[in-house]
Image (spheres, grey):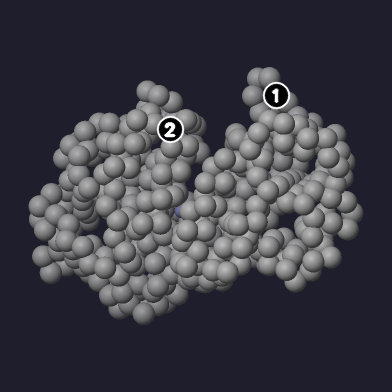
Amino acid sequence: MNITVFGATDHVTGSKTFIEFPDGLLMVDCGLVQGPLNADELNRSKLPFAASDIKAIIITHAHLDHSGQLPYLVKKGFQGNIYCTPATAKLMQVILMDSAGLVGEDYYSEQDVSVTLSMLKTIEWEETASVLGGSVKLRPAGHILGASSVYLSSQGKKIVLSGDLGRKDDPLIPPPRECLESNIVLMESTYGDRNREGDYRKELHSFLTTVSRESRIGIIASFAVARAQMLLTLIFEFYQRHPEEKVRVVLDSPMMKEACKIYKTFSHLTLHQHELFEAMSDLEIIEHQREWESLSRKSGPLIILSSSGMLTGGRIRRHLENWQNDPKAILFLPGYQGEGTPGRSMMEGQRQINFDSETTINWQGEVWGSDAFSSHADQAELLNWVANISKDTPLYLIHGEEESKQKLKQKLRELGHSTVMIPKKGDIINV
Ligand SMILES: [Zn+2]
């Protein structure tokens, strides 16, 4: 059985792996490359196989860097089934529809997304599905709602693909289930070179109490899916225990609103079903222009949650524009800030930001950042995921910067794993 590792080899986005199954070619994840200047070019570059030659696709989770190229492949002639968990299918509806508005009609349209969504086939975790003459099982990977690791079996061989792995102490999502024995494991290595620092509860609580006690405007820039629901649940929990600190919390992002509905539907898959359900039921959402106009004249204490998380677009910008002259306003960035994004510039101390040719802001307030909220396993957690498999099982590290992969490889070797490889784009692995 041949495995072709294609995406997420040189960087962390654009995940794509191809596996030759008895009845045809299977693809695991179909992600968009995001971030690098030549991302658009990479997203249009030729794949090692024609779209019509791919017979089925498995999506580990809904993040755009794992699912965002699906509609393009469908447009190019892919006709098979797309397998994922029910929660991933729901989240993909929101994420891909939003993506259609960003990638440009010539890449794919909402119509292409609709066709793609009609091809989804859901599989529950731990259920074995027959696919292309082999079998597929999905197991919880932590990370975000519905995220899975993929267990493939065909002609007496077993392959594991980790997908993005979550952390053990995520406030909402249960930790990943440990890796099972197989002939080969392909694992992510986003945080392969470090262990997370900071305590997300402490950092959020400090933000919430500062806003309430000093009557500030607190603007949180969050990813609309997963991070926002985690923050809202943590905020809800904190106010339950400290009602004296409770201030008005407003949500301003249509995508966030949709993702909240989905998290509410699937709250039984989370660790805090009750709190999440309550938090998602009790939201003040900006729907109309007049609500925004009224909000824009308010003073603190007030908390606004909006997106995008790296300030690359979305309604967050109107809040920054509106409160840019308030030296007491706080912009809170509880997420990864990619290189070249306005969020990264703010974190690095820049205060004059050109959002586009017409909008420049001059932020007079404070900027608080945090790495503590990441939904990725750190080095110790990655090592723990493979702790119980045989030391002879070949491990292939993907989905990470070079430095992360090298450091993780070194650690795994020290722990006795005899074969740890870092494949290059286009490498073929024979199992
Ligand atoms: Zn992810």
> Which residue: 38% across, 45% down?
67
| Amino acid identity at mark 2 | Ala
> Which residue: 47% across, 30% down?
101
Question: Which mark lies nearer to you, 2 or 1?
Answer: 2
- Work out whether residue 67 or residue 337 is closer to the camera in this orientation and state it: 67
- Work out whether residue 10 or residue 351 is closer to the camera in this orientation and state it: 351
> Which residue: 48% across, 71% down?
175
Residue 333 at x, y percent in the picture: 68, 49
Residue 284 at x, y percent in the picture: 68, 48
| Amino acid identity at mark 1 | Thr
* In the rendered image, the vertical position of residue 212 relative to residue 345, given as above or below: below
Picture disc at residue 277: none
Q: CA distance from mark 2 to mark 1?
A: 24 Å
Of helix, strand and loop, which one carries label 1?
Answer: loop
Picture disc at residue 100: 2
Q: Which residue is mark 1?
A: 359
Relative side of 35 to 251, left or right: left
> Which residue: 57% across, 40% down?
254
For the residue with label 1, is its CB less than 8 Å from the closest atom of ligand 1?
A: no
